[in-house]
Amino acid sequence: MSLSPLLQELITSLRVLPGVGPKSAQRMALHLLERDRQGAVNLASALEAAVEHIGECERCRNLSEQPVCGICEDSSRDRHVVCVLESPVDLMAVEQTGGFNGLYFVLKGHLSPIDGVGPDELGLDRLFALVEAGDVTELILATNPTVEGEATAHYIAEQLDESAVNITRIAHGVPVGGELEFVDGGTLAHAFAGRRSLRRGRDD
Amino acid sequence: MSLSPLLQELITSLRVLPGVGPKSAQRMALHLLERDRQGAVNLASALEAAVEHIGECERCRNLSEQPVCGICEDSSRDRHVVCVLESPVDLMAVEQTGGFNGLYFVLKGHLSPIDGVGPDELGLDRLFALVEAGDVTELILATNPTVEGEATAHYIAEQLDESAVNITRIAHGVPVGGELEFVDGGTLAHAFAGRRSLRRGRDD
């Protein structure tokens, strides 16, 4: 098909977006050109500004355009609790619950020796230095409940074995609103192993 | 949530893409920043180039970065048949079938007096001039089978009543591979009204 080369290029470039296949890319390109050229111009400049200015927070490794991110600088947050996450997406998910008021530490990955991802790539030296500085009383390991996420959590816990910090792992179990019938076996096993007494006082 | 303002802006800008809600926009922004910054830069420049250089073909009104588009300039195409479509997306869909070798005319809309879209906005004067120039022997009206699309097709046919050109409308009926059970009543009625004899010679 004799498509305009620039249009073809735009369609190809849109494919870098996750979840966008050839058909969606085509629809997006035509939508922008036919109905929202201003939106396309804005998107182009937002992309450029974001790529140029957004780096990582030097304390928590979250995406930030300042040397230290807004969460780390927020004096109203509890500096004694640090939640360790695999990625900025996870951080946004936790932030959106509004239920956590501590600080974060973003690993940007999980231990994966095959892919050459070791403790250095995850910035674990920085995390350990943070813990050793003494301010932190609880470290919540909220890596994903996958084999690699679990391994990463266990590695961190092991390395901090000598430290006085309280190390916790988020609970795994049946999702709220989920039905037992549709929950996989591994999750169900976790839910049973992590069961808690409903009678006050008997709960450990 | 104390999100980086530039990141927030990128997420908002991504929402101009059709079918992209707040969650997808967030996922896209983080994906680009974390894993494909080069892709983001390429996308930004493709967007800028496309918006700056892509206009419309002066003959067929399709999107084109040249004054006359590649299809209109292609000497191997049949200049006697012109297919009239509502939008460049429709043109791409027809082109991708590979079954049509004539030229196109893109209306970029349909008659809709309420929205202020009349014959002038659809470039109908240009279409009529093209037909009157005499080269065209068949005009295939392939506007959408909606109320507005049908009205537009009928208006064009009416205006060219005096002309010698053969005016046809694409067939509407049961989609190939579709099942009668799931086809709506309007389509079924069209399919019955447009039935053709299977015996050669009896077909009109």
Image (spheres, coloured by chain):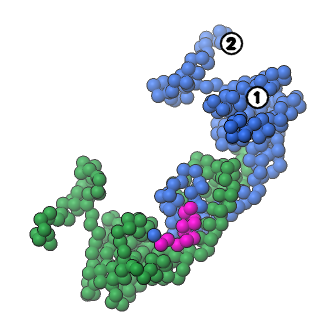
Chain colours: A blue, B green
Q: Is residue B114 visible?
A: no
Where residue A86 sits, quadrant-wise, is: top right
Q: Could you tell me which residue is drawn at 38 percent across and 72 percent down?
A: B85
Q: Position of residue A77 (x, y in %)?
A: 78, 36
Q: Position of residue A168 (x, y in %)?
A: 72, 24
> Image height check: is A118 above or below A189?
below
Task: Provide the residue designation for mark 1.
Answer: A156
Q: CA distance from mark 1 to mark 2?
A: 24 Å
Task: Provide the residue designation for mark 2.
Answer: A204
Q: With B33 as the anchor, is B21 left or right in this view? A: left
Where residue A107 sits, quadrant-wise, is: top right
Q: Could you tell me which residue is drawn at 68 percent across and 12 percent down?
A: A204
Local SS, label 1: helix
Q: Main secondary structure of the magenta part?
A: helix
Closest to the observer, A159 or B87: A159
Q: With A39 as the anchor, is B63 left or right in this view? A: left
Looking at the image, the residue that sits furthest to the right is A133
> Image height check: is A180 above or below A98?
above
> Image height check: is A30 above or below B3?
below
Closest to the observer, A3 or B140: A3
Q: Chain of mark 1?
A: A
Quadrant in the picture for the N terminus of chain A: bottom left
Q: Position of residue A198 (x, y in %)?
A: 59, 14
Residue A148 within the magenta-colored segment of the rendering: no
Residue A10 within the magenta-colored segment of the rendering: yes
Type of amino acid at the residue the image marks with label 2: Asp
Numbered range of the magenta stretch: A2-12
Q: Position of residue A50 (x, y in %)?
A: 72, 56
